[in-house]
């Protein structure tokens, strides 16, 4: 596999770079440090199978444009995309294979599946999602919390998200609460609380290091080899 890294000088980019080694054939980062190109134009066309993006959601258009130009797949691991950016991703997937996930952890993919399955067993239960991240994280709720919410909505299509309650906010029947905590150096904790009235089930995933995301991104990139145009995610990889 031959990969181009976008956000190569970032924390995640460096982890992925270390795992792929010689398989990295191009690097892009806005800071332009360490001899890395600032833009895709500066990098120019290279022979690559995939563009892996861990830069910023605003780079989605450039990443997709470059992936299409070189005839490669795109693996997008950033979060916080606007509706317009999500539409660009969906449109690009009509031409090239695109892997798009709010979290690249295989463990989170399993958690999403378990949350959906458990919610299906208890259709009347109250459900709350709690996510905890470090104090530098920009977006809230996290992309992972939204993944969990959307997974549950597959069995509760009438559900509505209530993000960060405040003021007079008596719980409604169909809501799923999402609470975001930001503190210290927490890599990431996600919990799904399911309260039936007589019992509580708690599903939890805790990230010990960001290395799990780098591992997942590499797995996703390898999964995309030989794939046709379309939109893929962690659930696709689980099978």
Image (tube, rainbow, N blue to C red):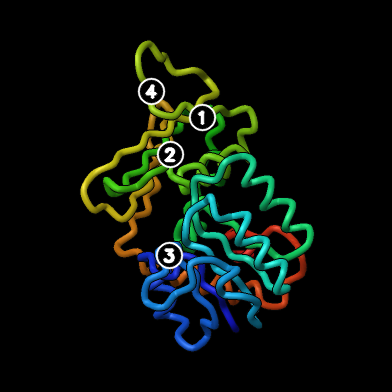
Mark 2 and mark 4: span between their CA atoms?
Answer: 12 Å
Q: Which residue is mark 4?
A: 165
Q: Quadrant of the N terminus?
A: bottom right
Q: Secondary structure at mark 3?
A: helix
Compared to residue 213, the image places residue 58 above or below, namely: above
Q: Residue at x 63, y 66 (%)?
A: 74
Q: Secondary structure at mark 2?
A: loop
Mark 3 and mark 1: span between their CA atoms?
Answer: 26 Å
Is residue 129 among the parts visible in the rendering?
A: yes
State yes or no: discs 3 and 4 in contact (Cβ < 8 Å).
Answer: no
Q: Residue at x 38, y 44 (%)?
A: 138
* Drawn side of residue 146 relative to residue 226, left or right: left
First in sequence: mark 3 or mark 4?
4
Q: Which residue is mark 2?
A: 141
Mark 3 and mark 4: span between their CA atoms?
Answer: 30 Å
Q: Quadrant of the C terminus?
A: bottom right
- Residue 165 location (% of width, % of height): 38, 23
Q: Which residue is mark 1?
A: 161
First in sequence: mark 3 or mark 2?
2
* Drawn side of residue 41 relative to residue 167, left or right: right
Label 1: few (<14), some (14–19) or many (≥20) C-alpha neighbours in 10 Å: some
State yes or no: discs 2 and 1 in contact (Cβ < 8 Å).
Answer: yes
Q: Which residue is mark 3?
A: 213
Label 4: few (<14), some (14–19) or many (≥20) C-alpha neighbours in 10 Å: few
First in sequence: mark 3 or mark 1?
1
Residue mark closest to the camera, 3 vs 1: 3
* Drawn side of residue 146 relative to residue 74, left or right: left
Q: Residue at x 48, y 67 (%)?
A: 38
Mark 1 and mark 4: span between their CA atoms?
Answer: 10 Å
Q: Residue at x 44, y 29 (%)?
A: 163
């Amino acid at each position: 596999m031959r990969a181009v890294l976008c956000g190569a000088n970032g924390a995640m980019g460096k982890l992925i770079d270390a795992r792929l080694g010689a398989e990295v054939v191009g690097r892009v980062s806005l800071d332009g440090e360490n001899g890395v190109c600032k833009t895709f134009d500066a990098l120019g066309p290279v022979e690559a199978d995939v563009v892996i993006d861990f830069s910023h959601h605003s780079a989605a258009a450039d990443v997709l444009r470059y992936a299409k130009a070189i005839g490669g797949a795109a693996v997008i691991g950033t979060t916080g995309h606007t509706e317009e950016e999500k539409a660009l991703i969906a449109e690009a997937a009509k031409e090239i294979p695109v892997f798009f996930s709010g979290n690249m952890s295989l463990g989170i993919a399993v958690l999403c599946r378990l949350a959906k399955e458990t919610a299906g067993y208890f259709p009347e239960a109250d459900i709350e999602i709690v996510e905890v991240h470090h104090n530098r994280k920009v977006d809230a709720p996290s992309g992972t919390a939204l993944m969990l919410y959307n997974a549950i909505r597959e069995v509760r299509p009438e559900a509505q998200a209530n993000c960060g309650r405040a003021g007079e906010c008596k719980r409604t029947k169909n809501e799923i609460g999402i609470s975001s905590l930001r503190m210290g150096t927490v890599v990431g904790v996600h919990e799904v609380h399911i309260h039936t009235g007589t019992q509580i089930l708690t599903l939890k995933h805790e990230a010990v290091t960001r290395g799990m995301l780098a591992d997942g991104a590499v797995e996703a990139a390898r999964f995309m080899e030989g794939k046709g145009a379309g939109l893929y995610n962690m659930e696709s990889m689980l099978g």
